[in-house]
Image: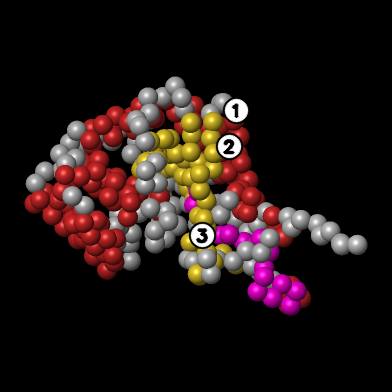
Amino acid sequence: METLQAPVTVKDQVFAFKENGKDMKTLRIPFEILANSKEFLASSGKPQASRPEASWITMQKLMQLLDLRNIVHEVEAIYVASEDSYAPLTTEEKNLYLSEIPVKMWIFNRLIAKISLTTPDANVPEGMKAVIAFSYNKNGIQIAFGTGVNICSNFSILSGRVFQTYGENKIPYENLIAEVARYIDNLPQWQENEYAMINSMINTSVGIQSDIDELVGILLTAAVRANMNGDLSALNITEVSEMVREIIKTDSEDFKNVWHMYNVGTFVLNFTNKVNLIDAIDKHVMWRDVILEKYGIPLLSI
């Protein structure tokens, strides 16, 4: 008689940073993989103060806040980075698993996720949606509200605020969840501001070629200065070059307004691109500030 084998559970599935046999620096995974991975603990054996709960627990709390307010949502994407992700194995476990390490042994210590929201009562422009971005890395946790552009999976942070448990504007984890809840309660106002800014950008011309060249010059100067000082810039030197390539290969008619130009930058900063996942949200905010200042568009927030 043939012996039936029990199905492999998610936690026992083999995981590696590979896609179609190719090594990957960033990989998209489903929430089930993340939720069955191993929690990061500091050397004290306790969670880090700036991220006292596992990444998937915090994401579940975000989704519970949305559930309580009857806001339809889905985890659109989760990207994990091979850097800072590892499987801490004992000698016995190394001999047991060899190169086929299961999900349950992996620690994903650097990730970014997008949760898309469906808000039928909001006046949502065609091809756009409200999105919450969640970043979990060695520094702590970041949560940002913004707009997703469906056609190219871009993410913008215009009127949205960024909440984080580290850096200059850090707040305690408990306050982070409370602030997110307050923001969700004000979702209609935030969306109204976000879409008003998008309309302002659509109705603002980028100007003649010399104006575009000036913007590129501003970005390149900031990138070089940041590189010299070890700081962060909206776009680094390589990203500015990529942006220029996108501008050159696209018909000039597509650069009639600031919204089109802004989306070239968010495309370059796409989470699936080569952007360091720790810096992704900060760079989106910096790019927003550059474009709003350059074209005199006021920042609307709540």
Determine if the magenta segment contains residue 96. Answer: yes
Query: Badge 3: few (under 14), some or many (20 or more) residues near its Cα, within 10 Å?
Result: some
- Image quadrant holding the C terminus, namely top left
Which numbered dot is residue 134?
none
> What is the quadrant of residue 14 in the picture?
bottom right
Of pointers 3 and 1, the one earlier in the residue sequence: 3
Q: Is residue 301 visible?
A: no
| Tag 1 and tag 2, C-beta contact below 8 Å | no
Of pointers 2 and 3, the one earlier in the residue sequence: 3
Place of residue 277 in the rendered image (x, y in percent of width and height, measured from the top left): 45, 57
**Residue appearing at x 16%, y 44% in the figure:** 253
Determine if the magenta segment contains residue 9. Answer: no
Query: How far apart, in angstroms, are the residues tagged by discs 3 and 1?
Result: 31 Å
Over which residues does the magenta segment extend? 95-113
Q: Mark 3 or 1, which is nearer the eye?
A: 3
**Residue appearing at x 49%, y 27% in the figure:** 185
Mark 2 highlights which residue?
63
> What is the quadrant of residue 201 in the picture?
top left
Q: Name the one closer to the observer, 111 or 43.
A: 111
Name the secondary structure under disc 3.
Answer: strand
- Tag count: 3
Residue type, numbered disc 1: Leu
Mark 1 highlights which residue?
68
Mark 3 highlights which residue?
27
